[in-house]
Amino acid sequence: MDSSPPIEATVAAPPLEGVEFLPLDECERGVIEMFVSAADVLGFPRSLGELYGLAYISPQPIHLAEVCERLKMSKGSASQGLRTLRDLGALKPVYVAGDRRDFFQPEIKMRVLVGRLLAERLRPHLERSSGALGQLKNEADATVTPQVKKFRQERIEMLGAWQKRISTFLPLLQRILR
């Protein structure tokens, strides 16, 4: 009887030679939960908080296989999340000699994280909503009373004032963060 392993087992490389992925410990779970809460406040998916939290608390760069195993996340979800965090500037790709996989470390400078968040998320939202506000000001709804129409116009004008203040403040905040 042949005791050699099947061909698939000899061809496939292990995740990392001699390294097992340990379950998350209490400290890691606590840090990850903090970033999950922050992601929720910022309107990001829970998975982005989990991914960034794992990268943040890991002393070594993380990679897809580790993320999938340790966070019990599907490969597709983990891959998409890593790409999103990389595009947001929250994760930086790093080179690991002798390994062809993509590895990531977290961006830990708050000024960089907040600056990218403002530039990537808030600025486009402000630009999109500016056109919508202009359109709302011009729309007249014949089905509402004059009092409701006046109230709505005042609220739309207030939104415009808020938007203008934020648009003025945003470049100043970005300069402070540099």
Image: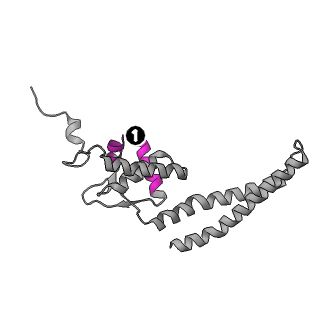
Q: Residue at x 44, y 59 (%)?
A: 90
How many numbered circles are shown? 1
Of the pair 149 and 175, the residue shown nearer to us: 149
Q: Quadrant of residue 95?
A: bottom left
Q: Is 7 in the magenta?
A: no
Q: Quadrant of residue 166?
A: bottom right
The magenta segment is 65-85
Residue 140 appears anywhere in the view: no
User: Which x, y percent locates residue 104?
Assistant: 36, 57
Compared to residue 103, the image places residue 141 above or below, namely: above
Going by the numbered disc 1, the residue's amino acid type is Ser
Q: Residue at x 54, y 73 (%)?
A: 176
User: Which x, y percent locates residue 14?
Assistant: 23, 44
The colour scheme used to paint the residues is one colour
Q: Is residue 171 left or right of residue 115?
A: right
* Residue at the extreme left: 1
Q: Residue at x 70, y 56 (%)?
A: 129
Compared to residue 94, the image places residue 70 above or below, namely: above
Q: Quadrant of residue 121?
A: bottom right
User: Which x, y percent locates residue 46?
Assistant: 47, 45
Residue 128 appears anywhere in the view: yes
Identify the residue position indicated by label 1 in the image.
Answer: 74
**Magenta stretch, main secondary structure class:** helix
Q: Secondary structure at mark 1?
A: loop
Q: Is residue 44 left or right of residue 124?
A: left
Placement of the N terminus among the 4 image quadrants: top left
Q: Residue at x 86, y 46 (%)?
A: 141
Compared to residue 165, the image places residue 138 above or below, namely: above
Q: Crowdedness of circle 1 by 10 Å Cα count: few (<14), some, many (20+)?
A: some
Of the pair 48 and 76, the residue shown nearer to us: 48
Q: Is residue 169 left or right of residue 53?
A: right
